[in-house]
Image: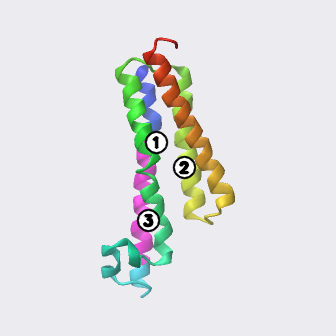
Amino acid sequence: MNPTAIFWPVIAHVVLVYIVYAVVGKRRYNAVQSGEAKTSQFRGRTDEPSSSATASNNLMNQFELPILFHVVCLALFVTSGVAYVPVVLAWLFAISRYVHAWVHLTGNRIRYRQPAFSVGFFALAALWIWFALHLLAVV
């Protein structure tokens, strides 16, 4: 397997981050245009109008757990630990982030958002376990 394959799910996540930035920007722009908010409200997170708060919260989510994803993908690449299983797990994580973001940015139903988060959480945990086993020369 080409070891650079581990970077495609990383790139997919980066694309998602840019999409969420665009959604946040559009929602904030619309809030100002409609009179729901003033630009000064965006200085701090306390005055974020509800129309853009969810998108802003999702953007923060893209820099929490995914940081561990980016690190483990780089670590696997650097230590020659890239194989079929971690690439599949990386894709599972990236796809789960898209589903999580979609739910969060649309209806924001916890009933659907939480399972999407859990899939990514456990896929990432499995990636870290794979990395540890790789370092121990078990896999």
Q: Mark 1 or mark 3, which is nearer to you?
A: 3
Q: Is residue 43 magenta?
A: no
Above or below residue 108? Residue 98 is: above
Q: Main secondary structure of the magenta part?
A: helix
| Magenta-highlighted residues | 11-30
- The CA distance from mark 1 to mark 3 is 20 Å
The three-letter amino acid code for the residue at tag 2 is Tyr
Other residues around mark 1 within 10 Å, as few (<14) / some (14–19) / many (≥20): some
The three-letter amino acid code for the residue at tag 1 is Ala
- Front position in the image: 9 or 41: 41
Q: Residue 103's spot in the image, x, y percent? A: 60, 59
- The CA distance from mark 2 to mark 3 is 15 Å
For the residue labelled by badge 3, is the local secondary structure a helix, a strand or a loop?
helix
Q: Which residue is mark 3?
A: 56
Mark closest to the chain's N terminus, 2 or 1: 1
Mark closest to the chain's N terminus, 2 or 3: 3
Q: Which residue is mark 2?
A: 98
The three-letter amino acid code for the residue at tag 3 is Ser
For the residue labelled by badge 1, is the local secondary structure a helix, a strand or a loop?
helix
Above or below residue 132? Residue 71 is: below
Above or below residue 53? Residue 75 is: above
Judge left or right: residue 110 versus residue 126: right
Mark closest to the chain's N terminus, 1 or 3: 1
- Front position in the image: 38 or 122: 122
Other residues around mark 3 within 10 Å, as few (<14) / some (14–19) / many (≥20): many
Above or below residue 136? Residue 129 is: below
User: Could you say which quadrant of the image residue 6 lies in?
Assistant: top left
Q: Is residue 15 magenta?
A: yes
For the residue labelled by badge 2, is the local secondary structure a helix, a strand or a loop?
helix
